[in-house]
Image (cartoon, grey):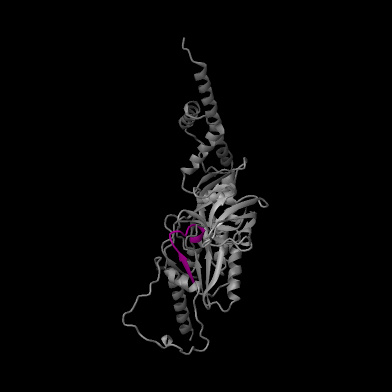
Amino acid sequence: MLAISTHTTGAYMRAKALSLLFAWWVLMPFTVQAQTESVISNDLPIEDVQTFAEVFERIKRAYVDDVDDATLLRNAMRGMLGELDPHSAYLDQEDFDSLRESTEGEFGGIGIEVGMEDGQLSVVSPIDDTPAARAGLQPQDAILRIDDTPTERLSLQEAVELMRGEPGTTIKMTVLSKGAEAPRTVTLTRENIRTQSVKQELLAPGYGYLRISQFQSRTGEQVREAIRELRGKGPLDGLILDLRNNPGGVLQAAVDVADAFLDQGLIVYTEGRLPDSDLSFSATSDTIAPQVPMVVLINGGSASAAEIVAGALQDQRRAVVMGTDSFGKGSVQQVMPLGNGDGLKLTTALYFTPDGRSIQAQGIKPDVEVVRGRLEVAENSGLQLREADLQGHLEGNGAKRTGGSAAERLQEDYQLGEALNLLKALNVLGSRAGG
């Protein structure tokens, strides 16, 4: 008579039950979907299901630490999604909330952008009219402590998580300002912070600059507001749209931004396995800058939604794209809430530009390739004297001296300077053609 230990029998029965449960869990969505459309086969390899159950049981029985069933199943789901592609993922409650905050541009915090400078957590910029700005925090202030936690061993993400929190709660920060002899401690009350994903300025009279750092739900609206502000300063003869190092974001925001400069035609379309993944977006007649010459700056950090905008304006011959090849993330992710409060981010389709180009692993190639660099003024041993160099020379009518941050940035940022030069050249050619 064959003897079987109760431990082995329990493990076998557990594995068998788990196998049946797992098969039902996986088969259930397939069965529901098969009722409407036979897209996915519901034939599962039973041997692989049994192997999964066996691995599960062996981990439970022999792993060095005790691991509960929920953790193992959640890790299995993470692995299932993580092996599909770099962008599909299982999102726990914290990750799900963080993704929502980044796309909506709204969170509880003190209103400060931080970075690492020589390994030290430092203030990059306080956001206007926020607790950080009202407390007098300045760029390059070193943040030494957050509440009772020293920052010297914190990662940037860990520091950001400590500073964020529920509106109305307080936070103490020890900061050392540049040139100060001793640090100071400030107590701040967190508020609901709404970030601006769009910045604007005039680089030269008539030539505007728009920087989009990320595509959030309000980015399209912010772009239109920024252009209205630029036009309020005088005629707009040219516009630079800076999408460099823009990681993307919300699809609808990319459509809204492209629509601000296009009055007709296709912007982007998607194709996937399911009918509801096939979408198409076209421009409306409501455009805020239909005739303004444009240059779009991209680089290897321009991805996803940034590539949609660049590709649409390039294919529609609306703008000159300048810089270096973009990242090439042309896949669509849908974020789906789950019943337990977690979320699922799943790749469901691919993006295509109006001319039918796939962005995925291809990216957008610029019309004019310009690598990033710094403009250096060469010294000339044979100096040439000009009227403007003479002491006490007369200024021409309406002459204005330029300088300041815009001029310095143009010297530091070679791509930006070349974009401005191209816009000026386009206006010269346009005026001559018109004449």
Q: Is residue 320 above or below residue 350?
A: below
Which of the pair 195/405 is nearer the observer? Answer: 405
| Residue that protrudes farthest toward the top in the picture | 1
Which of the pair 70/48 is nearer the observer? Answer: 70
Q: Position of residue 93 (x, y in %)?
A: 59, 44
Q: Position of residue 238 (x, y in %)?
A: 51, 75
Is residue 148 shown in magenta?
Answer: no
Residue at 65% in and 50% down:
166
Please give left or right for residue 123 compared with residue 374 in the image.
right
First to last magenta residue range: 294-307
Q: Position of residue 99 (x, y in %)?
A: 57, 50
Task: Name the quadrant containing residue 418.
Answer: bottom left
Residue at 52% in and 66% down:
211
Please give left or right for residue 170 compared with residue 73 in the image.
right
Which of the pair 112/121 is nearer the observer? Answer: 121
Q: Is residue 234 above or below residue 270?
A: below
Q: Is residue 10 visible?
A: yes
Q: Is residue 274 visible?
A: no
Q: Is residue 322 above or below residue 271?
A: below
Which of the pair 74/21 is nearer the observer? Answer: 74
